[in-house]
Amino acid sequence: MLAPLAGGPSTPPLAAAVSNAGGLGFLAAGYLAADELSARLAQARALTGGPLGVNVFVLEETPVDHEALAAYARELEPEAASLGVELGDPRFDDDELAAKLEAAAGIDVLSTTFGCMNAETIARLHASGTSVWATVTSAAEARAARDAGVAALVVQGAEAGGHSGAWSDTSEPALPLLALLADLRATVELPLVATGGIADRSAVVAALDAGAAAVQAGSAFLLTPEAGTSEPHRRALAAGGDTAVTRAFTGRRARGIMNAFMRAHPDAPSAYPHVHHLTAPLRAAARAAGDEQRINLWAGTNYMRAENRPAAEIVARLRA
């Protein structure tokens, strides 16, 4: 399965290519307007007759340290000024969840990140023919998702690139994937979809042997021609480098390739999506300028296995 890859790499051609190759292609709804999601779904459906999935963010507003947020904004002002932009408005929003559920009506699979929908909504979606999955990073989250009635769990290990799917940004970091699979296999009786560090056949086999029913790969597809990965991000992936977890770009823990922005801002507050909105103009300007040192370079620990090959070939390579 294709990981959602919100924030740029996710495209209808990529999702369709994975589904056409016998996998399950996902479209990321995160950060899109609901009408844009509808347009992308229509494009993907025109490109494949196979199954498709959509991933949505489930966000709960929690208290934020506004003094720390204001201090971080002051810290970033020179970065924004050097790019000729103003920082964005730090604020909470729910990423248009209700509208996106309407836009995704009839989708084969709907997965959630950062939380789980309530039991009533899950039951309604199941009755409509959509299978609902929840991303989890701990046994407690797995039990809560099971009790809400999800059909499967996307088990995200610590190796995963991009945002941690943890329901709370202040929870303990996730276990490595194989350890987390072993923990959840003993905790819940639901199909487990393994994600995090899945970039070659050996990782696929290890995850299946550890109890996963399927695997989901993300970083392995970042260099495919179908992906919407930006040029500076592609250069950074090809150049290599260590990954680390940071809150600097969005105010939520996420794994990416180390760059100057991450090193310069190690103490960003836990405030999502507030910091995401704050840094969005800065990151957009840096991306347009081809500056890989001031954009988020999301990548998992095994991103070095990514190849500039068609997505169908990546699916074939990963198949065990």
Image (cartoon, rainbow, N blue to C red):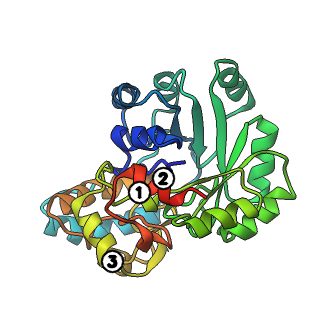
The quadrant in which residue 259 appears is: bottom left
- Give the amino acid at mark 2: Val
Can residue 3 be seen here?
yes
Task: Give residue 250's position: percent from left, percent from top.
Answer: 42, 59
Q: Amino acid at mark 3?
A: Asn
- The reply to whether discs 3 and 1 touch (Cβ–Cβ < 8 Å) is no
The residue beneath circle 2 is 315
Q: Helix or strand or loop: what does disc 1 sit on?
A: helix
Picture coordinates of residue 178, whole percent (x, y): 71, 68
Q: With respect to residue 18, does 185 lie above or below?
A: below
Left or right of residue 263, residue 317 in this image: right
How dense is the environment of label 1, judged by Cα within 10 Å: few (below 14), some, or many (20 and up)?
Answer: many
**Quadrant where the image shows the C terminus:** bottom right
For image coordinates 53% across by 67% down, the residue present is: 200
What residue is disc 3 on? Answer: 259
- Disc 2 element: helix
Q: Earlier in the sequence, mark 3 or mark 2?
A: 3
SS for callout 3: loop
Across and down, in percent, residue 75 comes to 31, 72
State the separation of the CA atoms marked 3 and 2. Answer: 30 Å
What residue is pinned by disc 1? 221
